[in-house]
Amino acid sequence: PPPASPVKLSRPPTAGAIRQRHPVNTLFRRYYQRGDLPISIDHCGGRGNRIKWRVGQLGALDYHVFLPIFVDGTADFCGTRVVVCYAVDPVEG
């Protein structure tokens, strides 16, 4: 029998883990860019950023409105908005 020809192996396709992704248009992104969320970012020098609530009483915060917006923001992955969405803790203030 003739000798078997060498098998050419090709590289597997890249997974794309480090490629630039297009931002997702989420409700959180829209409200954050318009400034409609009752939060602000407190830049604490070298200690990192903290979330400050702009409401007088946290009991006055309407969770039925804002909770779905913050949960929707977990799909966002652009810098500050990710930090805001995951760091929000109304109990801590």
Image (spheres, rainbow, N blue to C red):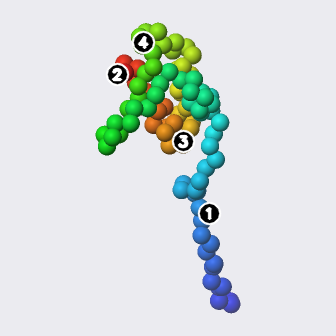
Asked if the residue at tag 1 contacts the one at tag 3, i.e. Cβ–Cβ closer than 8 Å, the answer is no
Numbered mark located on residue 92 in the image: 2
* Distance of label 3 from label 1 (alpha carbons): 24 Å
Distance from Cα at disc 1 to Cα at disc 2? 45 Å
Return the x and y of residue 79 as percentages of the image width and height: 50, 43
Decide which of tag 2 and tag 3 comes sooner along the chain. Answer: 3
Question: Circle 3 is placed at which residue position?
Answer: 77
Q: Residue at x 53, y 26 (%)?
A: 70
Q: For the residues marked 2 and 3, what is the alpha-carbon distance in whole angstroms?
A: 24 Å
> Which of 46 and 19 lies nearest the eye of the viewer?
46
What amino acid type is highlighted by mark number 3?
Phe
Helix, strand or loop under label 4: loop
Label 1 belongs to which residue? 13
The answer to whether one can see residue 63 in this image is yes
The residue that mark 4 highlights is: 56
Residue 71, image x, y percentages: 53, 27
Count residues near mark 2 (Cα–Cα under 10 Å), then give few for <14, some for 14-19, many for 20+: few
Secondary element under disc 2, as helix, strand or loop, is loop
Q: Nearer the viewer, mark 4 or mark 2?
A: 4
